[in-house]
Image (cartoon, helix red, strand yellow):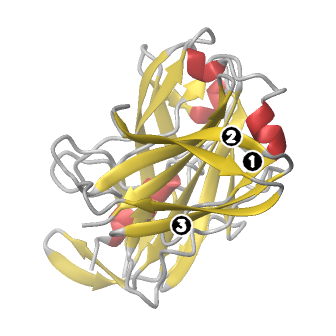
Amino acid sequence: MKNLLLSTLALMLCVAASPLFAQGPGCTPDPQFSVANGDFGVYPEPYQAGITSPDSSGIITKACEGDYFEYVFTAVVPDSIEFSGTMVPLEKVTLDPFPDGVYLDAGSGYAALSNVGLSYQCDPPSCEFLKLTEGCAVIYGNHTLTAGVYPTQIYAEAQSFVALAVTFPDPTLFPGVYDLTVLPASDPACTISVDNVVEINLGIAQNSPNPFRGNTTINVTSKINETFSFSVYSQNGSLVETREVELRMGDNTIEFDGSRLGAGVYFYSFEFEGQRSVKRMVVAN
């Protein structure tokens, strides 16, 4: 069983910035992780150098200067946690009861996420994650951060026999980092036109199954008959595969064989005339 503090404290990264019941985009837990399957943890987990687990990717989506940012975490909460080497029963985990339980180091010490224009919303709306439940939280907003990498520290409370104050990540108990990377507005990844012909004409579904070993399927609905470039990249940006695909108006199916790939996070894209749409997929061990 994965440590609950991993599952909920990491989740708190994305619930730390505005009044608890602020309006926002909402979130839905990723259905591939569930209590029934024993997937106790937060997804994605903190990034650790040298760890090849596809779920230990940290905050993989990068923000752009002066632009809207949004990222969703999924948590699956067990009914007990390990604390100081002992398993203790758990009732729930919540964000630190003080305002703003998550702090981001913007270069001059940690400051509340709300100070940089970010907000949050949870499912459940109370941001109290009960034992043996699945939940999610989305961090979102038009942030004021400049280009850089911003480490984040989380303060939470696990309710057992007594309230247990926990800091996360912790170099001993919960190693890893959640770094929010902000790209310059001039970065190519931040200059996609709102007239992106790929986004306008293609409805690209999440690959299924995901995570997967071997083959996975991508369903694409197209408004036009056209040839697109289909490419797959590793997490460090290396090209894994590229090929031309003929998409016809209506529903299309793209098969991808990932049997030769090592476990980890990958990205697949459809490109046309220099414009593209990108999604994330995970190859399992």
The residue wearing badge 3 is 217
The image shows residue 142, relative to residue 41, as above or below, that is above
Q: What residue type is labelled 3?
A: Thr
Residue 58 in view: yes
Residue 100 appears left or right of 144: left
* Sequence-first tag of 2 and 3: 3
Q: Which secondary structure, mark 3?
A: strand
Residue at 82% over, 43% down: 201
The residue wearing badge 2 is 227
The quarter of the displayed image where residue 277 is located: top right
| Quarter occupied by the C terminus | bottom left
Label at residue 199: none
The crowding category of the residue bearing disc 3, from other C-alpha atoms within 10 Å (few below 14, some 14 to 19, many at least 20), is some
Looking at the picture, how far across and down is residue 20, in whole percent? Answer: 73, 54
The residue wearing badge 1 is 19
Residue 36 appears left or right of 264: right
Q: Which amino acid does label 1 sit on?
A: Pro
Q: Which amino acid does label 2 sit on?
A: Thr
Residue at 19% over, 45% down: 171
Please tell me whether mark 2 or mark 3 is closer to you in this view.
2
Q: Please name whichever residue, 54 or 12, is drawn nearer the observer in this view of the structure.
A: 54
